[in-house]
Amino acid sequence: MARALLLLLLLAFALLQDPAPPPAAKVVAAVAKAAAENAALPEEKRLKDDALGDFYVRAAAAAAGEDARAFLVGLAHAVDPGATLSRHPLTASHFRGLETAEEAEARRKSLGKPSLRGRSDLLLHFACSAAVAAVATPEAAEAGGIAKEAADARPGGSGFSFADLLADLAGIKLAAWVKEEPTARLARLTKEFRGSDFCPDPAGQPEGLAAEAFAKEYGSVSDERFRKAVAGLKEAVGKLAVYAKK
């Protein structure tokens, strides 16, 4: 009886303690530290744009060690000032406990404007789609990216962007690649990540398509014309030289 009571008391005490932070929290903290250090530099020495984005990915990969999921989740949260995935009902549970409100505010203030292929929005598409592929499936990440662009094509939206979709697919490919050999590939990303190696040049991709213009050119997202366009984007990602390396 006394033993059982002791065990119950120990269990209750354990439940009252702060839960261990998820592995991705370490990645978020590493990117936040990198951001603060960069922001503290004189203006002329600070990393900006693609160089800053590459810096954050390398910091995230170094902090993740051998944990591909922690890398992908932590990176997506750390580079997104809007905390998109932590607010979405289908992904929020995977982003709980990554940082306190005070830590999030400090990170956002020093984050700067990291980019991919010269655009901050493409970095967010790339990182967030990679994270969704990690916590769900590549198919779910692709469907989510297409749904987001279809929503943007409605009145008041920014229009359907194949450049954004290209970055989504590039992120999904990155997630699969890292998960195949996490130890070796995270070590490689730590040393030599460059966003331009992992995402094709989006120049020339149709953007800003309103629903009527999209329907005229591609029909719908289930139309063969659209599927062919998506297949072309996937082919461009798959042909990147980085994926030919052993």
Image (cartoon, rainbow, N blue to C red):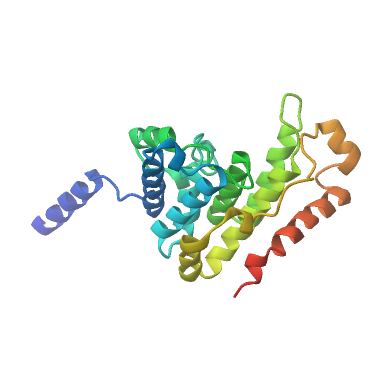
Residue at the extreme bottom: 246
Q: Which of the two residues, 229 or 204, is positioned nearer the viewer here?
A: 204
Relative to 100, say whether 175 is above or below. Answer: below
Q: Which of the two residues, 24 or 220, is positioned nearer the viewer here?
A: 24
Q: In which quarter of the image is the C terminus?
A: bottom right
- Taking the spot 64% from the left edge, 47% from the top edge, the residue there is 117
Residue at the extreme left: 2
Identify the image quadrant of residue 212.
top right
- Taking the spot 36% from the left edge, 45% from the top edge, the residue there is 33
Relative to 245, say whether 162 is above or below. Answer: above
- Taking the spot 76% from the left edge, 29% from the top edge, the residue there is 154
Q: Where is residue 24 in the image (x, y as percent from the top left)?
A: 41, 52
- Taking the spot 45% from the left edge, 49% from the top edge, the residue there is 74
Q: Position of residue 81 (x, y in %)?
A: 49, 35
Relative to 188, say whether 219 is above or below. Answer: above
Identify the image quadrant of residue 177.
bottom right
Q: Which of the two residues, 137 or 105, is positioned nearer the viewer here?
A: 105
Q: Where is residue 71 in the image (x, y as percent from the top left)?
A: 46, 56
Residue at the extreme top: 156
Q: Is residue 65 left or right of residue 134?
A: left
Q: How many labels does the image show?
A: 0
Q: Is residue 146 left or right of residue 52?
A: right
Q: Position of residue 140 (x, y in %)?
A: 64, 51
Q: In this view, does 70 lie to the left or right of 173?
A: left
Residue at the extreme right: 216
Q: In which quarter of the image is the N terminus?
A: bottom left
